[in-house]
Amino acid sequence: MQWQLIESDAALRGALEAVAGSPAVAVDTEFMRRNTFFPQVALVQLCFGNEALLVDPLAISDTAPLADLLVNPAITKVLHSASEDLEVFQRWLGVLPEPLFDTQRAAALLNMGFGLGYSALVKLVCDVDLPKGETRSDWLQRPLTDSQCEYAAQDVAWLLPVWQHLHERCLEQGKEDWVLADGRDTLAVYRAPGMDYLKRIKTAWKLDRRQLGALLAVCAWREQTARSRDKPRGWIIDDAACLQLAQTGPGNPDELKARVELPASALRRDGDAILQVLAAQREVAEADLPQRLPGPLNAPQRQRLKRLKTQVADIARRLGAAPEALLQSRDYELLLRESRGEPVEQPPHWQGWRREIVLEPLRASLQGGGS
């Protein structure tokens, strides 16, 4: 595989102008997280055909041509398991690649395996073993070695033949629109990120409404602080401390020190801010507090959940898709809550093709008592 290292604005403009009419581009990134909240972009790999373009983000200053490419609606952006790459582009360029064809998602919808790794997919489709020598390389070091560049080029080069294979199979089976729709749903989540902090705190359902409000407030403060300092969440305060703060509600420095397991450095640095967050939360009116979270499913609900999963497996079998590609684990619980008349915020992927093919049959079954 030939590759070209792009280390100037002029080289980037020229290389992208030369491939402006391509129908698709394979995209990958190399990045580092060195005790930071945000990923540090170290290399962007693009492949349009026989040559890989390795864009050095540390050497270029005009990123507009790359951003324009990523949002060009005429060029399909092909990525594998795109979530971390999307985080890189959103942070660095302020744009997201669209239209998005995620080869991991496509493979699952074609029943080739759910959560299939890139190397495994390349082996399955192209019968090629990708090198692993630079997996843990320091991608922020300069200059990049030839070995690093060769690895990065190989990493993106096989995406296009994989895409071509999956693209053709998706067209044959009527699933191309499904893959692209799932790409749009993924981007929608990144464009309007929710503050769903509670996924990481498994026992939050035990909290009363006042405590839950405190937990949400503390987690929101931690998120904002981690982002502003560009440090991991756990470096601010860990999940256990967030839960202790919500449960014990300290009102002064002595109570904070006695009730919550916080490092001395965190107490000195952020103790006052934490107490202010909790004090403000105590002033929230009862009517404005969040509703308690539902607890674990009881035995009858677990049986209904099991029957729902069996029904989805049957649908997946008929479609020739992996069941996990149709619904996520959380979807089943949301469907059960919806069937009990509870208010449910529908995820983006509940719209479009899934609604008619998957969700409506499940809802009908739930309403009829069959699940």
Image: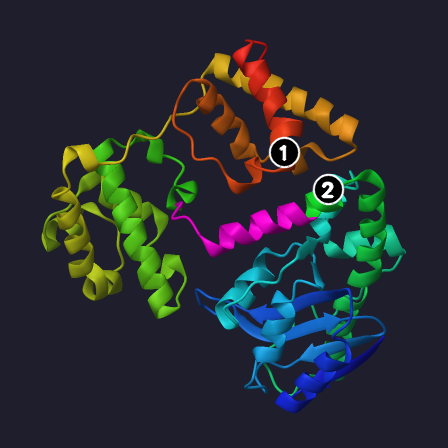
Q: Is residue 182 magenta?
A: yes
Residues drawn in magenta:
180-196
Q: Give the residue type at disc 1.
A: Arg
**Residue displayed at 68% across by 49% down:** 180
Residue 108's disc number: 2
The answer to whether residue 115 shows anywhere in this view is no
Foreground: 86 or 168?
Answer: 168
**Residue displayed at 47% across by 19% down:** 339
Q: Locate residue 254, reporting x and y percent.
A: 10, 52
Q: Is residue 346 magenta?
A: no
**Residue displayed at 85% across by 49% down:** 168
Foreground: 48 or 138?
Answer: 48
In what quadrant of the picture does the C terminus appear? top right
| Left or right: 268 as drawn, with respect to 294 | left
Q: Which residue is mark 1?
A: 354
Q: SS of the residue at dot 2?
A: helix
Q: SS of the residue at dot 1?
A: helix
| Left or right: 91 as drawn, with respect to 7 | left
The answer to whether residue 188 shows anywhere in this view is yes
